[in-house]
Structures are given as C-alpha cells and as structure tokens.
Amino acid sequence: MPLGPLTTSVLPAALLPTVGLVAAAAALGALAGLAAPGVARAVPPAPGRGAVSVGHGKLPVVGAVVCGGLAAARGPEPALPAFLLVASVGVVLAVVDLTSLRLPDPLVGAAALGGGTALTVAAVAAGTPGRLALALVGAALSFLLYVVLALLPRSRLGFGDVKLAAVLGLPLGWLGWPTLWLGLLLPHLLNGVLALALLAAGRVRRDTALPFGPALLAGAWLAAVLA
C-alpha cells in the first residue's frame, strides 16, 4: 500500500530524534576508541605479557558500533546515559586488558561511579526507585558470584575481573533478572569459543593467559542490546 504525502513527510521528522541520538552515541564511542590506545600505553603490562597489537585504526569504529548500537536498541530512556558511560569506559578497558592483562582500578572505579550516579538520576527522574535497588542487587550478586569463581582452584579470573563484573551488574540488574543472568552467562560462552578458536589456529597454548575483561564487556553489551 503506497504511503500518502502526509505520512512520507511526517515519518522522517519522527525518526530525526532517534537518528540524532544514535549519531551522538556513536560519536562518543568513537572518541573512546580514539583515546583507548593512549590510555593502554600508560598501563604497564602484567609480568610476562609481551606487546600485543589490537588494530588501533579500527577502535573508533568498534566504539561507534558499541555505543551507537546501545542507543539504537535502548532508545531515549532515562538510563541511557548510564549505559553509554559504562560502555565508553568499557571500550577503553577492553583495549587495556588486551594489551596489558590489567583492568586498572581508576578506570573500573570511574565506570562504577559514573554508571551508579547516572542510574540514580534516572531512577529519581522516572520515579522508579525499585529499579535502582535491583541494579544494586545485580552488582552485589555479580560480585559475589565472581568472587567464588575467582577463588576456585586453577581459576584464571583476577580480582580486576571480579570488580568489573560488579560494575556491569549495575546496568544489567537495572534491566531485570533475565538480562542479568544472560549477561553473566554470555562472557563464559564467548571466552570459551574464542579460546577454542585460538587453540585450533595455534595462536595460543593451553597455559596461555587470556584476558577475560573483553568477554565480560561483550557479554554485558549483547545482553543489554537484546533486552
């Protein structure tokens, strides 16, 4: 059925705010991607970690996809600034972890403080204190679960991973229990698939230390986009 002139003239105007929001979010992500290599160079690598290249020229595109995808999936909801803040810091954290096997406390703390503050503002603005409480429960549950995993014999999780999991539990908890559980499960699936692929390609050995932060961040991003 053909669209009438009124429909065709109104439809683009209705889409403009969403397009502008996605473009602004993508620009934020691209800036995070641009900043990531400089931050990574300032973080000393873990003992035994050699130089690792992560394709710096592609990082702005990755950041734009991460933040733009969140904006497209979540729309102009009150909690979107919190998601974008955590995601943009997460882009930097992923690069740092890939290059140095570290998740620096100042960056993880910035994501926690910024994300928690933005979610508090969103809860007050929307009149939904219950969702903020659920976000805090999600953070606490993620922290406790990853503490247990980190303390298991032969575990390769570090306490940087534990703290990052707690931070990501805030936005995942805000989105509800199904999203929280999905965000906790996906990182292990993604990391397992990646490890098997690298082993099959001969790029790593069974005792090679692989960063888990990028899988944590990717899993949380997918869960938020699919929620």
Image (cartoon, rainbow, N blue to C red):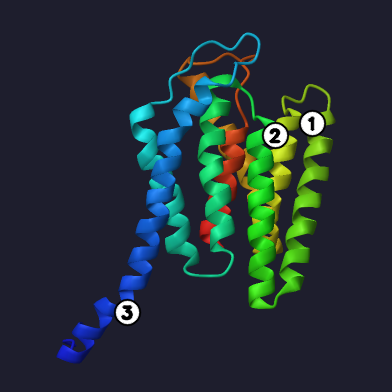
Query: What residue is drawn where x is 41% and y is 42%?
Result: 31
How far across and how far down the image is residue 183, in percent?
64, 51
The residue drawn where x is 58% and y is 49% is 86
Residue 195, picture quadrant: top right
User: Amino acid under label 1?
Assistant: Ala
Q: Please name the amino acid that badge 3 sits on.
A: Ala
Within the image, what quadrant is residue 120 found in? bottom right
Q: Residue shown at 61%/15% (left/top)?
A: 208
User: Callout 2, which amino acid?
Assistant: Asp
Q: Position of residue 177 (x, y in %)?
A: 71, 62
- Identify the residue position indicated by label 1 in the image: 150
Question: Does residue 86 lie above or below 36 as drawn?
Answer: below
Element carrying mark 2: helix
State the CA–CA distance, disc 1 to disc 3: 48 Å
Numbered circle sitting on residue 96? none
Alpha carbons under labels 1 and 2: distance apart: 9 Å
Location of residue 18 (image quadrant): bottom left
Q: Which residue is mark 3?
A: 14
- Sequence order check, earlier mark of 3 and 2: 3
Q: Is residue 179 visible?
A: no
Tell me the crowding category of disc 1: few under 14, some 14 to 19, or many 20 or more residues within 10 angstroms, Cα based.
some
Asked if the residue at tag 2 contacts the one at tag 1, i.e. Cβ–Cβ closer than 8 Å, the answer is yes
Q: Pointer 2: what residue?
A: 161
- Assess whether mark 3 and mark 1 are in contact (beta carbons under 8 angstroms): no
Residue 67, percent across and down?
A: 45, 51
> The N terminus appears in which quarter of the rendering?
bottom left
Instruction: Please tell me whether mark 1 or mark 2 is closer to you in this view.
Output: 2
Q: Are marks 3 and 2 in contact (CB under 8 Å)?
A: no
Q: Secondary structure at mark 3?
A: helix
Query: Closer to the observer: label 3 or label 2?
Result: 3
User: Measured along the vertical axis of the image, is residue 133 above or below residue 170?
Assistant: below
With 193 as the anchor, is 71 left or right in this view?
left
